[in-house]
Amino acid sequence: MKRALKTEKVSCTMLQPGFFSFSFESEDEKHKVLDSGPWSFASNLLVLQQCDPDIPEMCYNFDHCPFWVNLYGLPFGRVTKESC
């Protein structure tokens, strides 16, 4: 995981299957990782978000994650303003 996040300054604890808590050595390191995502680990999408300590883990919604996709060879007629 440290290699995927490109930092040695992180620890990870499993809260329940599929949910993990990440702790960083510094705020700068945390923001670097959060701003550099989304991440892929073991061929799975890893969605990280800053959590509020007053909100239970099961109340967070991880149903979407924006990321870039490159499509090569897409016919010009299929390129729209919305797809660019």
Image (cartoon, helix red, strand yellow):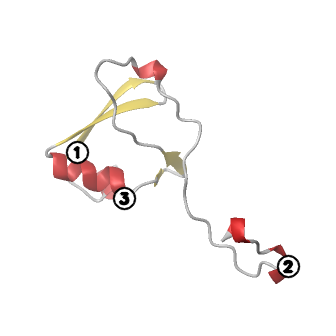
Query: Which one is in front in this view, the residue at disc 2 or the one at disc 1?
Result: 2
Quadrant in which the C terminus appears: bottom right
At x 71%, y 71%, the residue is 81
- In the image, taking residue 25 as reference, residue 58 lies left or right, namely right
Mark 1: amino acid? Val
Query: Which one is in front in this view, the residue at disc 1 or the one at disc 3?
Result: 3
Query: Which one is in front in this view, the residue at disc 3 or the one at disc 2?
Result: 2
Mark 2 vs mark 1, CA separation in Å: 46 Å
Q: Position of residue 62 (x, y in %)?
A: 53, 35
Residue 50: which disc? Answer: none
Above or below: residue 23 compared with residue 14: below
SS at circle 2: helix
Label 1 neighbour load within 10 Å: few <14, some 14-19, many 20+: some
In the picture of the structure, the residue carrying the numbered disc 1 is 10
- In the image, taking residue 34 as reference, residue 43 lies left or right, namely right
At x 41%, y 55%, the residue is 37
Q: Earlier in the sequence, mark 1 or mark 3?
A: 1
Q: Position of residue 56 (x, y in %)?
A: 39, 17
In the picture of the structure, the residue carrying the numbered disc 2 is 77
- In the image, taking residue 44 as reference, residue 5 lies left or right, namely left
* Furthest-left residue in this view: 26
Residue 36: which disc? Answer: 3
* Furthest-right residue in this view: 77
* Furthest-front residue in this view: 81
Mark 3: amino acid? Ser
At x 36%, y 28%, the residue is 14
Label 3 neighbour load within 10 Å: few <14, some 14-19, many 20+: few
Camera-side residue of 39 and 68:
68
Mark 1 vs mark 3, CA separation in Å: 15 Å
Mark 2: amino acid? Gly
Label 2 neighbour load within 10 Å: few <14, some 14-19, many 20+: few
